[in-house]
Amino acid sequence: MNQDYLSHRLTEAERRAFNETGYLVLEDVLSPDRITALTALADGIHAREVAEGFDPRKGLFYPNFIPESPLFQELVDHVRVLPKVWGILGWNIYLYHAHLIVTPPSGEPVSDKTSGWHQDSGRVNAEIESHPRPRLSLKVAYFLSDTGEPGRGNFWVVPGSHLADTLDRPASGVGQPDGAVPVLASPGSAVLFDRRLWHAGTPNGSDVTRKVLFYGYGYRWLRTKDDMTVQSLWEQSDPVRRQLLGWGVNSNGFYSPTDEDVPLRVWLREHSPDDAK
Ligand SMILES: O=C(O)CCC(=O)C(=O)O
């Protein structure tokens, strides 16, 4: 890691916005060339899945894509994004989950059917006894296609809902919860969101296929949420990326890390001591 990371640390205004709304939009994180290259990779995965029998009219949810390309691996410690992630979660973190979502045009106008609103992490929400629920993790959504207008399969959120354990939905199954808004993300944007933020994917009524890469970061003691077959990348990765790809000295080090377990902390201690606490 080089000094460039320091210029992108979480500002106090960004921290306040994330704490209050549960999400943060960073624009122009990916260059046009990078969007083109990542889109070609996403299209390749989609084409392969379709060739293997996946119905192209359906939305594709494809986890564990990180091993498929160095370009996916580079996003794990993106210089504009990683400082925000450590600013929010701290240094004892790794990538516990990643998935690609491709949402093709539905071929119909978008209906007002209530979407699949949820908080992330499944049983965590039922089994951890606390109010509000603990943050534990966040996701970064890299938008490859243009969802700058509503109706394009946008990622929807209820701003500020991350501290609420329940969400009222219309009993009729029509309409969205009070306060729900589409995130109007342009290509190349990264949207960071707290796992507790009530959110939903929505149907795509446009003729633009939606493509988004999701990177989930959590504490190192949290289990992976997909197969995350990234172990073969450890040897070739620099120490911080290796940490983020789940490496550790031994099991105890995920709970009580030594410096060897968490090179991110060692780097922060030298370059940004307040973030190393
Ligand atoms: O497709 C979307 O916009 C929603 C993704 C989602 O719900 C998730 O990553 O948990």
Image: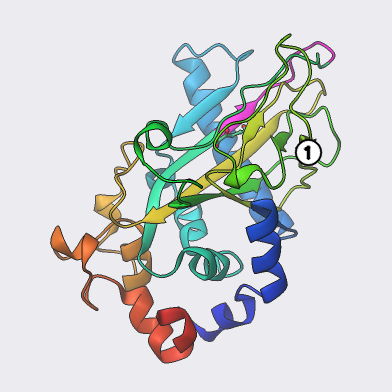
As for residue 228 lying within the magenta part, the answer is: no
Check disc 1 and report the residue beneath it. Answer: 147
Q: Magenta includes 105?
A: yes
Establish if 57 lies above or below 17.
Answer: above
Q: Quadrant of residue 68?
A: top left
Q: How is the image coloured?
A: rainbow
Residue located 72% across and 21% down the image = 203
Looking at the rendered structure, the kind of residue marked 1 is Thr
- Main structural element of the magenta stretch: helix, strand or loop? loop
The residue located at (35%, 66%) in the rendering is 92
- Give the residues drawn in magenta, as a range: 101-109
Viewer-closest of 36 and 122: 122
Figure quadrant, ligand 1: top right
Residue 113 shown left or right of residue 220 in the figure: right
In the figure, 212 relative to 109: above or below? below
Q: Residue at x 54, y 27 (%)?
A: 46
- Residue 248 lies left or right of residue 117; in this view the side is left
Residue 240 percent across, percent down from the top left? 36, 70
Number of callouts: 1
In front of the other: 133 or 180: 133
Image position, residue 155 (x, y; %): 69, 36
Question: Does 86 sit above or below residue 110?
Answer: below
**Extreme bottom residue here?**
270
